[in-house]
Image: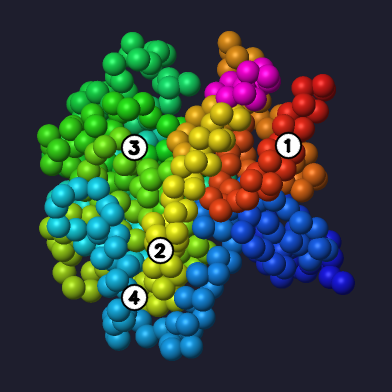
Amino acid sequence: MKTNKDLIQRRNEHVSQGPYNIYPIFIKKAHGAVMVDVEDREYIDFAGGIGVLNVGHNHPKVVAAIKDQADKFIHTCFHVGMYESYVDLAERLNEVAPGDFPKATMFLNSGAEAVENAIKVARISKKRPAVIAFDNAFHGRTLLGMTLTSKIKPYKHEFGPFAPEVYRMPYAYCYRCPYDLKYPDCGVACADKMEDFFASYVAPETVAAVIAEPIQGEGGFITPPPEYFPKLQEISRKYDIALIIDEVQAGSGRTGKFFAIEHWGIEPDIITTAKSLAAGMPLSAVTGRKELMNASHPGGLGGTYAGNPLACRAGLAVMDILFKDGVLEQGRVLGENLQARFNEMQSKYEIIGDVRGKGAMLALELVKDRKTKTPATDEAKRIAQSCFEKGLIILTTGHYGNVIRVLMPLVITDDQLDKGMSILEEAFTELNKG
């Protein structure tokens, strides 16, 4: 029997060290919310391929759609020979995206590609060069993606120079307010600060786009208050700036709505999706106002593999699973369950300083002291390692690496959820005992 140790040795011999591996295991099969490694050990999956598997591993409808398409053709390149699934999925995304205005969609392979192309759309349509991004943001590892990304290590360190005309301002991080204010007395000043930003850093008439995650993923599941995005939209419209909402991690049903930004009731000009859009197949999308999306000349956007037919069929299956099979509602209920459990844990464990997120996209920020809010980075690592040793895959995140996040498949069973939560709480109890 192959062992993880043997395969790790081969991995280290033949694979670049650049791609990081969180846990020392090789998976041989997975289904729903469970993964099995080559040594036949089972793991409850609270990571979901980093937010890719909202409908679960190997959902039967996704597998069937991929197999059916593979029997017909695997690739033609949409630029050479078109296929209906591309158009079908674009139509469905246009229908569910917020806003009562004409929309258009294009497909790519990854979240980073979607972000890059959203910026291209904004720049060519607005005829302006500058982009505003935020502290704690993550938008990918490509040149423009890592430029937009906030965290230096490991994403940007020694990979410069970076793309020009990208400006960064603080985000609505209420637990660690960059302006030392308290919500709601602050009046959500962090949004209003954009007016000052225009005066000090970049003129609004040169800004093509403001790009923001509705809930910052790698930044620590930072979740703005209700007034934040309406204010950003108002300011963006005032200066004719495209508001791009990056739904790569937060979208496709993770928060109880298909798009997380629906919780704020605004209408973005452009939305990017990826990850759970096609349940593990490489597919991303840029959906936006039709007049913006059509600003590019033919051939200015696209890619050889972009919108691959297998991925588009998988994406259509995901839409059916979420909307027709009730998994979107299932995710909403899961989120309510998790919120109640995490609130209870916070009342028991002093190390949990903040519980935040929406739906089943929730996180626990760990601190050494609730008054000083000193990040408990090592403790977060110990909890994740303890969970792994007990058969639970869970992820840390955040600027300081002190946030425990959950991205389990929305189709997780009650028994699997209970077992996973028991393991997580056991890890906190052990930590509490020292």
> Where is mark 3, residue-wise?
263
Give coordinates of residue 36: x percent, y percent: 74, 61
Q: Secondary structure under badge 3?
A: helix
> Where is mark 4, residue-wise?
85
Q: Nearer the viewer, residue 195 or 103?
A: 103
Q: Which mark is residue 422?
A: 1
Q: Which mark is residue 320?
A: 2
* Residues tagged 4 and 2 counted as in contact (Cβ below 8 A): no
Location of the C terminus by quadrant is top right
Q: Residues within 10 Å of mark 3 (few under 14, many from 20)?
A: some
Residue 412 lies, with reference to residue 345, above or below; the image says below
Q: State how far apart marks 4 and 2 are (Cα).
A: 13 Å
Q: State how far apart marks 1 and 3 are (Cα).
A: 30 Å
Q: Earlier in the sequence, mark 4 or mark 2?
A: 4
Give coordinates of residue 166: x percent, y percent: 32, 43
Give coordinates of residue 400: x percent, y percent: 58, 31
Residue 2 lies in quadrant: bottom right
Q: Amino acid at mark 3?
A: His
Q: Which contiguous range is marked in magenta?
A: 343-354
Q: Which mark is residue 126?
A: none
Please report the residue visible at 59 percent of the width from the left and 62 percent of the height from the top: 57
Q: Residues within 10 Å of mark 4 (few under 14, many from 20)?
A: many
